[in-house]
Amino acid sequence: MVLQQLLPTWRTAAQQMGDVAWSQFVRERISYGRAMPIGALDSLARLYVRRSVLIARETGLVTRRAEELPWDAALMEQVRTELLVPRSTYTPGFSTDTEAAA
């Protein structure tokens, strides 16, 4: 639930997906089944916002508030892979703490 609190567009996406689908998305594509430190989540949110604003400007969309940023699952995955440790370094099933990042 932490990610939903960091950025309004993520909260909206989670509501549209539903709690189960959102948790599965975060677990499989963002946290890889591991708990993530709050600093990593904050960095993820900041980079997502920067990239979203740049993309919006390129397409002519003017954004003034975080709520206006569009949800982009592919961008979130891209930011995640650029910012944090690659998935290949994680051991699948190592941790059962999957709710921390969702």
Image (cartoon, helix red, strand yellow):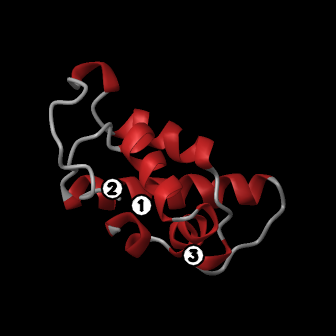
**How far from the left and from the top, in percent, is residue 35?**
20, 49
Q: Is residue 57 left or right of residue 8?
A: right
Circle 3 — which element? helix
Q: Which is nearer the N-term, disc 2 or disc 3?
A: 2
Residue at 22% x, 30% y: name it: 93
Residue at 52% x, 47% y: name it: 76
Task: Please rate how many residues cluster around mark 3, counting C-alpha atoms within 10 Å: few if below 14, some from 14 to 19, many from 20.
Answer: few
Q: Is residue 72 left or right of residue 42?
A: right
Q: Which residue is mark 1?
A: 46
Near-viewer residue (7 or 58)? 7
Residue 53: name its quadrant.
Answer: bottom right
Kind of residue at badge 2: Ser
Q: Which residue is mark 2?
A: 43
Kind of residue at badge 1: Arg
Q: Which is nearer the N-term, disc 1 or disc 3?
A: 1
Q: Is residue 97 left or right of residue 60?
A: left
Q: Which mark is residue 66?
A: 3
Task: Please rate how many residues cluster around mark 2, counting C-alpha atoms within 10 Å: few if below 14, some from 14 to 19, many from 20.
Answer: some
- Tell me, yes or no, whether the two marked residues, 2 and 3, touch with CB atoms within 8 Å: no
Near-viewer residue (28 or 38)? 28
Kind of residue at badge 3: Ala
- Tell me, yes or no, whether the two marked residues, 2 and 1, touch with CB atoms within 8 Å: yes
Q: Is residue 15 left or right of residue 88?
A: right
Question: Farthest residue in the front direction?
Answer: 20
Near-viewer residue (1 or 21)? 21
Q: Marks 2 and 3, Cα distance to the nearest angstrom?
A: 15 Å
Residue at 67% x, 75% y: name it: 68
**How far from the left and from the top, in percent, is residue 25?**
48, 47
Q: Marks 2 and 1, Cα distance to the nearest angstrom?
A: 5 Å
Q: Is residue 50 above or below residue 65?
A: above
- Tell me, yes or no, whether the two marked residues, 1 and 3, touch with CB atoms within 8 Å: no
